[in-house]
Image: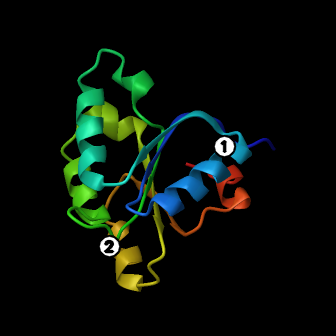
Amino acid sequence: MPAKKFTTVMLIDDNEIDNLINQKMIEAASVTENIYTHTGAKSAIEFLRNMEKMDMADKVLPDVIFLDIDMPLMDGFQFLDEFEKLSATAKKKCKIVMLTSSINPQDFNRSKKYTNVKLYLNKPLSHESIINLDL
């Protein structure tokens, strides 16, 4: 079965090296044409707020958001709290994958409380985890 295709993917991670590696893995898997990259959750949520105001929000919003947990200023859970305030269109379109190096079971359990979090993966992304995304 071929990998599922996504119109747009977003990476949110304060580590630029992780973003670059994950971007290259996503490109290699050929699952999307567009990748938005943010090194902070604050800029990413602002970006999404601006996107949802556009007429074509359902076309420009990302299908998948890979979200790191441990980031300065605004962590992944604070991002999720802000994400919950977005429009129904945004919440319906964007599926969130927690992509983290955290092995803390509390983080995993906490992420389950958010309906938009569809998957919890450990860094780094692998070719298999990308092509097997079932969201």
- Quarter of the image holding residue 132? bottom right
At which x and y percent is residue 50? 24, 30
Secondary structure category for the residue under label 1: helix
At which x and y percent is residue 51? 30, 28
Q: From the viewer's perspective, is 86 left or right of 109?
A: left
User: What scheme was used to colour the molecule?
Assistant: rainbow
As rendered, which of 94 and 28 lies closer to the eye? 28
Q: Are marks 2 and 1 in contact (CB under 8 Å)?
A: no
Which callout, 2 or 1, points at the residue further toward the start of the chain? Answer: 1
On screen, residue 118 above or below 103: above
Amino acid marked by disc 1: Glu
Amino acid marked by disc 2: Arg
Q: CA distance from mark 2 to mark 1?
A: 30 Å
Residue in the picture at 36% in, 68% down: 69
Q: Residues within 10 Å of mark 1 (few under 14, many from 20)?
A: some
Does residue 134 show up?
Answer: no
Q: From the viewer's perspective, is 78 left or right of 8?
A: left
Residue 73's disc number: none
On screen, residue 2 above or below 23: above
Does residue 82 show up?
Answer: yes
Farthest residue in the top direction? Answer: 55
Residue in the picture at 66% in, 43% down: 27
Farthest residue in the right direction? Answer: 1
Residue placed under numbered mark 2 in the picture: 110
At which x and y percent is residue 91? 33, 40
Count of numbered badges drawn on the protein: 2
Residue in the picture at 36% in, 17% down: 56
Residue 27's disc number: 1
Q: Of the residues tagged 2 and 1, which is closer to the observer?
A: 1
Secondary structure category for the residue under label 2: helix
